[in-house]
Image (spheres, grey):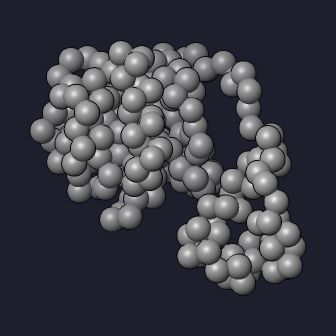
């Protein structure tokens, strides 16, 4: 486990995500915002970290290589019921959002979420909604990000990705050959 700083105060934050560049970048950004950050890359590491030092705040990826991030959310809520947990996912769906809230998450954000959005969600109080993002991703960018994610999950297999996205293979090849939209 990569532990950036031992968080024992009320600003302790556990980040559980198997995407190392994203996890490390988010950890640094949250440290600059005053959190004592602990990083974990798997369900096992997340469970171990929350048992050793129950965090006041947590950001947990829904799908991890060794299991479901909701197991970490439930464990955090058991050891520290007042903890504020935000679930991240690259796959936004109503069913998984409902499951995350039932497990004890206070919010559910789609990747890629930035540190400002995460901090707003973590620090928001029960009745208030965070303000909409200043520069939200365009619909074209969200679509492109989703296609790229599925492409990576299919081990960069164009035919399999096209089948899963219900898209013609040549159309997908044209999309993949272009740069990402803004």
Residue 55 in sight here:
no
Q: Is residue 167 left or right of residue 39?
A: right
Q: Is residue 165 left or right of residue 156?
A: right
**45 or 76: nearer the viewer:** 45
Q: Is residue 126 depicted above or below 68 in this figure?
A: above
Q: Is residue 30 left or right of residue 173?
A: left
**45 or 75: nearer the viewer:** 45
Looking at this view, name the residue that lies furthest to the left: 52
Say which residue appears at 32% left-offset and 52% top-offset: 41
Q: Is residue 140 left or right of residue 113?
A: right
**29 or 132: nearer the viewer:** 29
Position in image of residue 68 (x %, y %): 39, 59
Say which residue appears at 74% left-offset and 72% top-offset: 165
Q: How many marks?
A: 0
Which image quarter holds the C terminus? Answer: top right
Residue 163, located in which quarter of the rendered image?
bottom right
Position in image of residue 27 (x %, y %): 38, 33
Say which residue appears at 40% left-offset and 59% top-offset: 64
**21 or 93: nearer the viewer:** 21
Position in image of residue 81 (x %, y %): 27, 30
Looking at this view, name the residue that lies furthest to the bottom: 159
Residue 9 in sight here:
yes
Say which residue appears at 17% left-offset and 48% top-offset: 48
Position in image of residue 11 (x %, y %): 30, 19
């Amino acid at each position: 486990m990569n532990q950036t700083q031992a968080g024992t105060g009320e600003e302790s934050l556990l980040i559980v995500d198997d995407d190392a560049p994203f996890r490390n970048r988010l950890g640094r950004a949250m440290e600059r915002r005053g959190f004592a950050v602990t990083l974990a890359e798997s369900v096992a590491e997340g469970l171990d970290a929350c048992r050793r030092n129950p965090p006041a705040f947590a950001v947990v990826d829904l799908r991890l290589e060794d299991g479901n991030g909701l197991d970490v959310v439930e464990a955090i809520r058991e050891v520290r019921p007042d903890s504020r947990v935000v679930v991240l996912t690259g796959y936004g769906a109503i069913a998984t959002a409902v499951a995350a809230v039932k497990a004890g998450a206070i919010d559910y954000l789609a990747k890629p979420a930035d540190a400002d959005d995460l901090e707003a969600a973590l620090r928001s109080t029960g009745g208030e909604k965070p303000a909409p993002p200043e520069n939200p991703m365009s619909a074209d960018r969200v679509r492109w990000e989703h296609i790229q994610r599925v492409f990576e999950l299919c081990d960069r297999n164009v035919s399999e990705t096209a089948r899963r996205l219900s898209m013609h293979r040549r159309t997908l090849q044209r999309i993949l050959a272009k740069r990402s939209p803004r």
